[in-house]
Image (tube, helix red, strand yellow):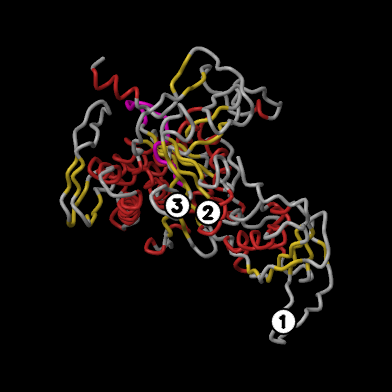
């Protein structure tokens, strides 16, 4: 093996197979050492997906290396457009489309999005964000690439079917997480990009769900070859390149050497190969620059796929569908794809919120480094603390606004009955980030050992009450509208429709892994 290949292997972020078990350690890692552990599993844990009979370990990387494969944020519109082929197809063409799409969709159960159902019991909603459709996108290198199943791109696309509000959130592959036990193996700790390797896409969704604090209903996994073939199948895409790109470090297709990539500014017609390089190139100042290019590609591919010249061309549609048939896997069902496609065509790409969990800005929620946990190499962790995701949960629920909360717009008041200074203010801030309509926080008249929720609306705010009951793990009590005391200026404030009194049993540190 040549020297370049050897050095590259030493820098790999992904899990490397080994033939011996590591020594047992406690269930949570100490902050001053790296942990890769085996832990006894409960009966419930043993039902997780089974993987190969080798554990994985992470090899140390002495300096940070930006992740590759970010171009796979474009999978969203590529997958949704597959439905169009089924809608306009008939006879032989329809049969060909069905044969290809059944290889893609319906892989695994998935929790399913209630928002796509015609009717449902609102008590099934698990928490803020569950009133949307949340899809995990994983971009992998695929066959022929080193670490073919490492998810170099991790993204969540969230759509509100009622308002068509759409948001996208990118998650860095270097985020250090807990990987729960799979099959016969115990809990390990490592980078989130290994979750797909360790337990598959459904397992990865469970890990990432813990990080972001909202349910993930579906997953879509796509590889490099599928994207390139999809772009070529629709005849290429047109991109207005805002700034010339000169990336001397861009890897060759074999991943074993460097070929570089240059692209002039201005309007460019791109085939699949160029579009992939444009989306993946790391030659930029920050994650936001790359995200802007990737969003251009998303919009261009979506627009080209939905053009009449594509929809009425059986050759293009068959090429698109069959190109993806062996390169995309999802647990979306065909009836759900139909509903999503109907929603997606009305989404205004210029209004899509595009967010990134990063380390680049003062307000960033993550920090990165090579010495955060010794021997772990370069990793990224929450500034709030390793495995502490409270701030991230608030951030995600803010960009994935739940339409049911917004529609009811219930007036909510939080009072502090715990005796812990500042608790009501902190909870009020967190609830505001999830788009609840909050009044000013205040102190309760008495001490409360347990948290209580009072419903003064007469049951007219069912969705808000259900979400709050899930968040605080408390059943709401119906009560008469309270008499409000005059404010300092003599005015009488409006009575809340829901009042939460925090007891000493409430923990502000619940949002941890």
Please tell me which of labels 3 and 1 falls first in the chain. 3
Q: Taking the image as drawn, is residue 120 in sight?
A: yes
Q: In the structure shown, which secondary structural element does the residue marked by tag 2 occupy?
A: helix
**The C terminus is located in which quarter?**
top right
For label 3, the residue is 364
| Residue range highlighted in magenta | 142-155
Mark 2 sits on what residue?
396
Q: Mark 1 and mark 2: span between their CA atoms?
A: 35 Å
Residue 186 position by quadrant:
top right
Which secondary structure is most common in the magenta stretch?
A: loop
The answer to whether marks 3 and 1 mark residues whose Cβ atoms lie closer than 8 Å is: no
Residue at the image point whose x is 21% and y is 42% from the top: 247
Image coordinates of residue 46 in percent, x first then y, are 66, 25
Q: Residue at x 43, y 52 (%)?
A: 87
Q: Which residue is mark 1?
A: 487
Relative height, residue 8 to residue 403 (above, below): above
Q: Observer-nearest residue: 150 or 366?
A: 366
Q: Earlier in the sequence, mark 1 or mark 2?
A: 2
């Amino acid at each position: 093996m040549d020297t370049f290949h050897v050095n590259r292997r030493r820098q790999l972020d992904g899990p490397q197979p080994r033939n011996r078990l590591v020594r047992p350690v406690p269930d949570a890692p100490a902050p001053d050492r790296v942990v890769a552990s085996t832990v006894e599993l409960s009966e419930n844990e043993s039902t997780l997906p089974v993987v190969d009979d080798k554990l994985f370990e992470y090899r140390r990387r002495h300096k940070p290396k930006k992740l590759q494969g970010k171009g796979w944020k474009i999978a969203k519109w590529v997958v949704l457009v597959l439905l169009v082929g089924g809608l306009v197809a008939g006879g032989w063409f329809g049969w060909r489309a069905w044969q290809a799409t059944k290889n893609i969709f319906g892989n695994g159960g998935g929790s399913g999005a209630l928002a796509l159902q015609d009717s449902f019991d609102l008590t099934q909603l698990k928490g803020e964000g569950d009133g949307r459709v949340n899809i995990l996108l994983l971009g992998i290198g695929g066959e022929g690439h080193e670490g073919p199943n490492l998810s170099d791109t991790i993204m969540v696309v969230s759509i509100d079917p009622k308002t068509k509000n759409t948001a996208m959130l990118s998650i860095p592959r270097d985020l250090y997480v807990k990987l729960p036990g799979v099959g016969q193996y115990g809990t390990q700790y490592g980078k989130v990009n290994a979750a797909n390797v360790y337990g598959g896409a459904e397992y990865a969704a469970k890990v990432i769900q813990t990080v972001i604090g909202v349910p993930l209903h579906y997953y879509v996994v796509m590889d490099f070859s599928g994207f390139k073939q999809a772009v070529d199948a629709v005849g290429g895409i047109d991109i207005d390149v805002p700034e010339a790109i000169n990336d001397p470090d861009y890897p060759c297709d074999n991943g074993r050497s460097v070929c570089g990539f240059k692209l002039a500014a201005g309007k460019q017609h791109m085939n699949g190969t160029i579009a992939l390089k444009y989306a993946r190139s790391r030659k930029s100042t920050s994650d936001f620059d790359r995200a802007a290019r990737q969003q251009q590609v998303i919009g261009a591919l979506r627009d080209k796929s939905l053009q009449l010249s594509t929809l009425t061309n059986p050759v293009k549609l068959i090429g698109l569908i069959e190109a993806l048939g062996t390169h995309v896997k999802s647990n979306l069902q065909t009836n759900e794809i139909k509903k999503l496609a109907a929603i997606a065509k009305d989404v205004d790409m210029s209004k899509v919120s595009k967010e990134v969990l990063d380390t680049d800005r003062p307000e960033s929620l993550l920090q990165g480094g090579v010495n955060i946990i010794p021997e772990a190499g370069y990793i990224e962790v929450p500034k709030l603390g390793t495995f502490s995701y409270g701030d991230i949960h608030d951030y995600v629920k803010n960009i994935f606004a739940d339409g049911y909360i917004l529609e009811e717009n219930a007036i909510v008041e939080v009072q502090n009955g715990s005796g812990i200074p500042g608790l009501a203010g902190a909870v009020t801030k967190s609830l505001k980030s999830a788009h609840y309509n909050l009044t000013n926080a205040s102190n309760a008249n008495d001490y409360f050992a347990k948290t209580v929720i009072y419903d003064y609306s007469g049951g007219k705010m069912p969705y808000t009450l259900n979400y709050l009951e899930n968040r605080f793990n408390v059943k709401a009590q119906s009560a008469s509208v309270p008499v409000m005391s005059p404010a300092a200026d003599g005015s009488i404030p409006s009575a809340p429709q829901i009042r939460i009194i925090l007891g000493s049993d409430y923990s502000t540190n619940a949002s941890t892994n």
